[in-house]
Image (cartoon, rainbow, N blue to C red):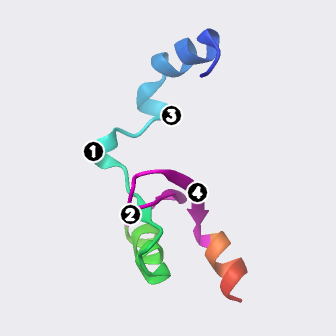
């Protein structure tokens, strides 16, 4: 739960801060890392949420996270 003031602020800024669910790119934790790299490179996202097959949020991953891990 978030503070009412912050919720009101975000509601007034939907076009700026929030991406509609139907336009959201996600990465399922069972997919290969090359898939998320392709998502990030082709869609211009700086990071994407990672979920399980049960649709539970695990975290967020970025290209720099991948590069720091791989190299």
> Looking at the picture, does residue 23 appear above or below residue 11?
below
> Looking at the picture, does residue 4 appear above or below residue 37?
above
Q: In this image, 2 relative to 45: left or right?
A: right
Badge 4 local density, few (<14 within 10 Å), some, or many (20+)?
A: few
**Distance from label 4 to label 2 (Cα)?**
16 Å
The answer to which of marks 4 and 2 sits earlier in the sequence is 2
User: Which tag is nearer the camera, tag 1 or tag 2?
Assistant: 1
> What SS does tag 3 mark?
helix
> Looking at the picture, does residue 19 appear above or below residue 51?
above
Residue under the image location 42 percent in, 65 percent down: 28
**Distance from label 3 to label 2 (Cα)?**
17 Å
Cβ atoms under marks 4 and 1 closer than 8 Å = no
User: Which tag is nearer the camera, tag 4 or tag 2?
Assistant: 4
Where residue 3 appears, x then y in whole percent?
A: 65, 15
The answer to which of marks 1 and 2 sits earlier in the sequence is 1
Which residue carries the number 3 mark?
Answer: 17
Picture quarter containing residue 21? top left
The answer to which of marks 3 and 2 sits earlier in the sequence is 3
Picture quarter containing residue 69? bottom right
Name the residue nearer the viewer: 58 or 24: 58
Tell me the number on the disc at residue 60. 4
Tell me the number on the disc at residue 43. 2
Q: In this image, 20 relative to 49: left or right?
A: left
The part of the chain drawn in magenta is 43-63
> What SS does tag 2 mark?
helix
Location of the N terminus by quadrant is: top right
């Amino acid at each position: 739960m978030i503070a009412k003031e912050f919720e009101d602020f975000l509601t007034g800024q939907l076009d700026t801060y929030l991406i509609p669910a139907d336009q959201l790119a996600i990465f399922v934790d069972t997919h290969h890392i090359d898939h998320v790299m392709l998502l990030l490179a082709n869609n211009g996202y700086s990071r994407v949420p990672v979920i399980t097959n049960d649709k539970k949020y695990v975290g967020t991953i970025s290209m720099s996270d991948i590069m720091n891990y791989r190299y």
